[in-house]
Image (spheres, helix red, strand yellow):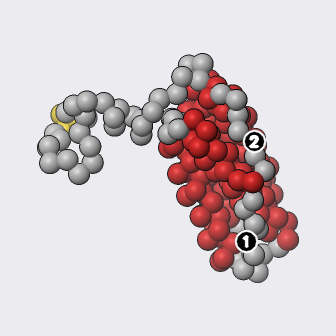
Amino acid sequence: MIDEKTKAMILEALNDEYKARAFYRLVIKTFGPVRPFINIVEAEDTHARSLERLCARYEIPLPPDEWDRTLRPPSSILEACRVGVEGEIQNIAMYDRFLEETDIPDVRSLFQRLQSRSREAHLPAFERCVAQGGEAGRGPGRGKDLPGRTQAGSDQKRFRHQGRTI
């Protein structure tokens, strides 16, 4: 069994991931499939599922996910990216607080992993979006939609040369 304090942290983290996922879905619904939202919304869904599995392991009932009914769409992609920056900063701080308060190995490990993704991937992506004035790209990103680039499953061979794929 798990103590009430840790249970509350897990549920707060899950609610935070639900909120982020709902907001990013709303941005996509409002503005279309724009980066970085189309990439990060999938990550938030993965984060939520990881926390849901933790809830199942410790027999914690799942809270309702009602964020899609309560959030308002941003007025621009730039505003959405600014909200993303603030949300990821708050998310990182939340996990900092939680990591000071729990010693349960699997809970700590998950919190560390989720915080790392926010710090190393999500926050920088939203910061780039803000720096570009909200000029977000379309498509999957990372050059995947550029002409001449190979896609996963392509029969074109890739060769490694001095640490680079050519």
Judged left or right of residue 151, residue 2 is right
Question: Mark 2 falls on what kind of element?
Answer: loop
Q: Quarter holding the N terminus? A: bottom right
Mark 2 Cα shell of 10 Å, populated few (<14), some (14-19), many (≥20): few
Q: Nearer the viewer, mark 2 or mark 1?
A: 2
Q: Position of residue 148 (x, y in %)?
A: 21, 31
Residue holding disc 1: 62
Q: Position of residue 22 (x, y in %)?
A: 66, 50
Q: Quadrant of residue 129?
A: top right
Q: Quarter holding the C terminus? A: top left
Q: Position of residue 58 (x, y in %)?
A: 71, 77
Q: Nearer the N terminus, badge 2 or badge 1?
A: 1
Q: The residue under label 2 is which amino acid type?
A: Arg
Depth check: give the residue in front, 72 or 80: 72
Judged left or right of residue 86, residue 138 is left
Q: Position of residue 23 (x, y in %)?
A: 67, 45
Q: Is residue 44 visible?
A: yes
Mark 1 Cα shell of 10 Å, populated few (<14), some (14-19), many (≥20): some
Q: Quadrant of residue 139?
A: top left
Question: Mark 1 falls on what kind of element?
Answer: loop
Residue holding disc 2: 72
Depth check: give the residue in front, 121 or 98: 121
Q: Is residue 99 visible?
A: no
Asked if residue 163 is positioned above or below residue 5 in the image, the reply reads: above
Asked if residue 43 is positioned above or below residue 137 in the image, the reply reads: below
Q: Residue at x 83, y 73 (%)?
A: 3
Judged left or right of residue 56, residue 121 is left
